[in-house]
């Protein structure tokens, strides 16, 4: 773990100082006093390092909220809010790297932004996979607590909706120039509340249940 952190730190410092990835693994490893073979025992490429950094942002945020005793008593809506606020706080500590990496991925997607290029962005795959597991657990808890309404055909798409929301918030925060990123805090609150208003029970669900009852008892 110590070596992985050393490599990640050296990589983030390099790209921030040079505005690009190292020229070669050989030169990068040499500066760390590693052989090229030693480097490859830890990472297969520079993109693999970057993917690990993005994953660490997520796992660190999740670990932080998980150890908070009050978090365990939160509603599902509140848990997602707490996660996003914590995640953004961790991103702030490495904002320069996030902006660099975001910009690189966005450029590779020909300006479509993270939301447009995500399926073709391997750097985010590990983060995405872990987030989907987190989202599925939250949604399952929400169904038990009646905060999430199961609906035919679209329930399985809920994790994708939360992932899209995550990328929207990341995109918003990178572009946010408000004092202390206050607008991002508002974006988090409004987007999460809107999401749960949509996936929660609504008058339309009551109408559907009534129509179903009438059909079954005609």
Image (cartoon, rainbow, N blue to C red):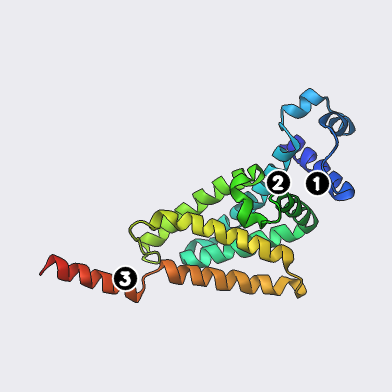
Q: In which quadrant of the rendered image does the N terminus lie?
A: top right
Q: Quadrant of residue 113?
A: bottom right
Q: Are marks 1 and 2 in contact (CB under 8 Å)?
A: yes
Does 199 appear above or below 111? below
Residue 103 in percent (x, y) is at 75, 54
Mark 3 neighbour density, 10 Å: few (under 14) some (14–19) many (20 or more) = some
Of the numbered discs 2 and 3, the one sitting upstream in the chain is 2
Residue placed at 83% from the left, 24% from the top?
35
Q: Residue at x 67, y 62 (%)?
A: 171
In this image, 213 relative to 183: left or right? left
Left or right, 164 with respect to 7, comes to left
Which residue position is annotated with label 2?
A: 53
Q: In the image, 142: left or right of 182?
A: left
Which quarter of the rendering shows the C terminus? bottom left
Q: Are marks 2 and 3 in contact (CB under 8 Å)?
A: no
Q: Is residue 74 visible?
A: no
Q: From what the image shows, is residue 121 above or below residue 116?
A: above
x, y percentage for residue 195? 49, 68
Mark 1, residue position: 12
């Amino acid at each position: 773990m110590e070596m992985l952190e050393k490599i990640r730190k050296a990589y983030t410092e390099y790209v921030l100082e040079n505005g690009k990835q190292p020229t070669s693994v050989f030169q990068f490893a040499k500066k760390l006093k590693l052989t090229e073979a030693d480097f490859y025992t830890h990472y297969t490429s520079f993109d693999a390092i970057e993917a690990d950094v993005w994953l660490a942002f997520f796992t660190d945020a999740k670990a932080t909220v998980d150890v908070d005793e009050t978090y365990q008593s939160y509603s599902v809506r509140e848990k997602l809010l707490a996660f996003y606020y914590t995640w953004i706080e961790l991103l702030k500590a490495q904002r320069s790297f996030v902006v660099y990496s975001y910009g690189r991925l966005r450029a590779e997607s020909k300006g479509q932004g993270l939301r447009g290029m995500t399926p073709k962005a391997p750097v985010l795959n590990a983060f995405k996979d872990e987030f989907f597991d987190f989202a599925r657990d939250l949604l399952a808890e929400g169904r038990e607590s009646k905060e999430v309404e199961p609906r035919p055909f679209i329930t399985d798409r809920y994790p994708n909706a939360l992932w899209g929301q995550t990328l929207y918030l990341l995109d918003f925060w990178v572009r946010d120039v408000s004092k202390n990123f206050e607008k991002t805090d508002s974006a988090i609150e409004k987007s999460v509340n809107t999401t749960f208003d949509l996936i929660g029970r609504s008058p339309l669900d009551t109408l559907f249940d009534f129509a179903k009852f009438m059909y079954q008892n005609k």
